[in-house]
Image (tube, grey):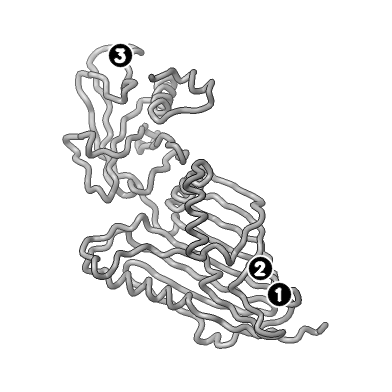
Amino acid sequence: MIKSSGYFLYKGRFNPISIRRLYREILEDLEIVYWAGFGRSRRQGAIEQDYIRVQEVDHMFFAFKKPDGSFNLLYPPDLYHKYQLNELPVSLYNTEAVIAKPFRGRPVFRREQFIRKDLQMEVADSVITNVIKLPGMDERMSYIRQTFFCDVDAKEKSISFNSMLTASGGISTELRRFMGQLYQDKEIGDYYQALSEFEGRGTSIQIDTITKFDLKKQKSYVFTINAKGTIQNGITFINESLVSIYLVSLLQQSMVDLPDEETADMDYYFDFIYTDLSMVVLNFPSPVRLIGAEQANRELKNEYGAYTLTFHASDNSLTIQSTYTILKDFMPKEDFQKMKELNDFVKQARNIRMLVRLKESKEG
């Protein structure tokens, strides 16, 4: 049964249909002329612009004009995510959408609403339609940056850190949605916890306390999480003056998943263009020297992505920076080897161990 918006406001919850109706009612009460928007996920192909069928549309939203003639986009929340103004699901990036509104050659009464309670368009004299290009984000706006400032205690053989994670653009949208699923759905949270333990992930960097969470509600919807914790492994004290660093245990990055080479017979759509940067700053109790520093830095770039790995030792600190970038959101099957080459290069670069020599401190 469809209940009034007042009922849901009183209960403190909305179902998907009712929240769309609430958005519509607010727009109408504010006398904002709005359009109904119909979108189709990028992987499903282009939307039919002249004949919109329910079976081909998997996204519905609202649009209303800004003073400059461009559109504000209003995408209703779902169970796990609350979209900000002009924020869209990443599957709609750089796609074309159809927007429509009724045209009537007679006075319009308040009861003749644009979209009925069942989300169908009201009968009108005519319907005005338009096609708009939905925005996307490039690698400068869509990114994740993870920085760990670590204090190394050589005597206790322990490492503590302060960290900051910053997500922007498409990664911000996806990560906030994923976090909402883990928080609200216990079965999903338990599944990913078990999967992480089974695969041996999440054991190197142990977060103990979240100290700050902040979200900016304007494009590109940057949010930051500050935390404190410890590093359990990945750094091994061989003796009093020699430390081994296993990069894959420290660099918290993920690469795009590619199909098996034997089955890569179709064009490939990446979720979106983005940059993933991971930086670890290790502060030691005495001056350090990186052994084999001249062979440590790595770099590779092609038309679909890029990767760089750099090391910098200065006085008592060692900075490791790893940057993985996806430059296009579509790859024809003929170029599969180019992307595979990049991913293989990243795996090889991160699957190395570096040796750091600790010099004797003046006090020691």
Above or below residue 67? Residue 327 is below
Q: In which quarter of the image is the C terminus?
A: bottom right
Mark 2 and mark 3 lie on one chain; the one further toward the N terminus is 3
Circles 1 and 2 in contact, beta carbons < 8 Å: no
Give how far apart the Cα atoms at labels 1 and 2 are: 13 Å
Q: Residues within 10 Å of mark 1 (few under 14, many from 20)?
A: few
What residue is shown with label 1? Answer: 157
Q: How far apart are marks 1 and 3 (CA)?
A: 75 Å
Taking the spot 63% from the left edge, 67% from the top edge, the residue there is: 231
Q: Residue 23 carries which label?
A: none
Residue at x-position 59% and y-position 47%: 214
270 lies above or below 232:
above
The numbered mark, 1 or 3, whose residue comes first in the sequence reads 3
User: Mark 1, mark 2: which one is toward the viewer?
Assistant: 1
Q: Is mark 3 on a helix, strand or loop?
A: loop
Which residue position holds label 2? 150
The residue singled out by tag 3 in the image is 108
